[in-house]
Amino acid sequence: MSRFPKKKENCTDKNFIFVRIYNYRMDTKLTLKLEKEVIEKAKEYASAQRRSLSSLVESYLKSLVTKENPESDPEISPYVKSLKTGVKVPANLDPKEVYSDFLAEKYK
């Protein structure tokens, strides 16, 4: 005996819900010109991720176009802003030299 009713008139049972799913996604083809080695490595990566190369490219492109204000600076948290000291750092400062001077002074 089947789990589902065979005839339409037997579908009055409240245990059955019929769902129709529509996919309105409009896929469009895109041709790209890439180096052969890049394509081969990308296909290997996609296969390892169990995804199609098309879905990887689509995800990457979506990540590029959905960023909010990509040219703007990242937002600085209030805590980091509170650490601001007002000390001006010279443009020609060499951090390695400063650190080596610090270590030389520390271990005299």
Image (spheres, helix red, strand yellow):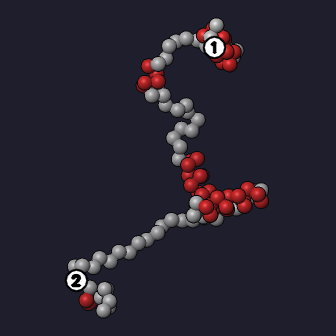
> Which residue is the site of mark 1?
103
Q: Of the two numbered discs 1 and 2 on the same chain, state the one appearing first in sequence.
A: 2
Percent from the top left, x then y, of residue 31? Answer: 70, 62
- Circle 1: is it few (<14), some (14-19), or many (20+) Cα within 10 Å? few
Q: Which mark is residue 9?
A: none
The residue at the point 56 percent across, 55 percent down is 59
> Which residue is the site of mark 2?
13
Give the left or right position of residue 13, taking residue 44 as reference. left
| Figure check: 57 above or below 99 | below
Give the left or right position of residue 21, taking residue 53 as reference. left
The residue at the point 66 percent across, 11 percent down is 104
Which image quadrant: the N terminus?
Answer: bottom left
- Circle 2: is it few (<14), some (14-19), or many (20+) Cα within 10 Å? few
* Residue 98 in view of the camera: no
* Residue 89 in view of the camera: yes
Percent from the top left, x then y, of residue 81? Answer: 46, 22
Percent from the top left, x then y, of residue 6? Answer: 32, 91
